[in-house]
Image: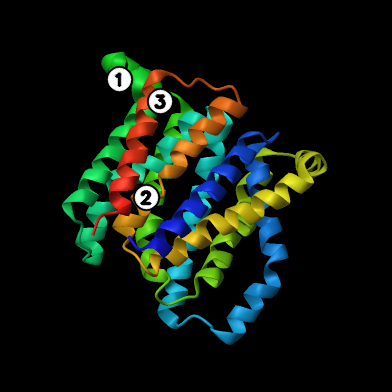
Amino acid sequence: MTGAAILLVVLSAFAHSGWNFLTKRARNPEIFTWSAALSANVILLPVAVYLLVTSPPDPIGWAFIAGTWSLHLAYFTTLSRAYRDTDLSLAYPLARGTGLLLIPVLAVFLLGEEMSPPAAVGVALIVTGIFAVSYGNALSGGLPGISALLRKSGIRYALATGVIITAYSIVDKRGVAHVSPLLYMYFLTSAASVGMPLFLRRAFPPADFIAEWRLNLRTIVLTGLLQFASYALVLTALQVSRVSYVAPFREIGIVIGVLMGAVLLDEPFKRGRIAGATLIVVGAVAIAFAP
């Protein structure tokens, strides 16, 4: 990876961990996630209009926008429900890491990318670290422990989020070749702000929306901007680096997310999670310096 790509992804990891942490602390994570996306769309509308006029997407670009719009609507829905039903330090690494089992393989076969041996080792270390962080106690309990874990709705939502991440990572690598990353990100964010109310209005009365805004208005706005910045930085990195490298390297955010959960939310941080976080860091370094 180039130095520019590394810097972009590191900054993205901090922004992504930050908005996930703020979402977990919300009164209602689903309403909070939608509100944050809506606030970013409103604040950044002038930028989007300018880019749409000066550098509009080509027809293929619009097709990729439609694809990522649909995938991110599903992503925001499953992620917010995962945080509703389980710990940040479990849902975050599981959601972010599941895609690593598929993204490098799909990038090689669908996008024609190549992965050097050091990068492959780095991906393997990150995947191992993710399993240690997410599944440590369950694996020590054998099949009954794993079965009990998978019966939890929050874990199932986190796994579904990981599959969606795999899909949109491949789509977005191609999409930013046809659309400006900032404009692409704006349409992507609108998936949550426009689409999520279709689901939320069935589950929550209007009073819940009003209460969330009254309690967390400033935090909602901050979260929306962090949401936008975190993936806009990744989209920019995808223009100069391979998705099979960028996607795994992003997982350094897992370490930040786990530390936030442990230190700021008083979630468990046992030896298995420490070992897993260490493997993720080592794997990320291997990818960063891989040819």
| Mark 3 secondary-structure assignment | helix
Q: Residue at x 67, y 43 (%)?
A: 31
Residue 67 seen from this side: no
| Mark 1 surroundings: few (<14), some (14-19) or many (≥20) residues within 10 A | some
Badge 3 or badge 1: first in the primary sequence: 1
- Tell me: 244 left or right of 42: left
Which callout, 2 or 1, points to the residue nearer the camera?
2
| Mark 1 secondary-structure assignment | helix
Question: Which residue of the protein is positioned furthest toward the left in this rendering?
Answer: 117
Residue nearest the viewer, comparing 64 with 220:
220
Which residue lies under the disc numbered 2?
249
The reply to whether callout 2 and callout 3 are in contact (CB within 8 Å) is no
Q: Position of residue 218 (x, y in %)?
A: 77, 47
Relative to 57, residue 223 above or below: above
Quarter of the image for the N terminus: give it: bottom left
Q: Position of residue 215 (x, y in %)?
A: 80, 39
The reply to whether callout 2 and callout 1 are in contact (CB within 8 Å) is no
In the rendered structure, find residue 25 and report the number of the disc placed on it: none
Q: CA distance from mark 2 to mark 1?
A: 25 Å
Which residue lies under the disc numbered 1?
139
Callout 2, which amino acid? Phe
| Mark 3 surroundings: few (<14), some (14-19) or many (≥20) residues within 10 A | many
Callout 1, which amino acid? Leu
Badge 2 or badge 1: first in the primary sequence: 1
Callout 3, which amino acid? Arg
Relative to 102, residue 45 above or below: below
Q: Residue at x 39, y 28 (%)?
A: 133
Which residue lies under the disc numbered 3?
273
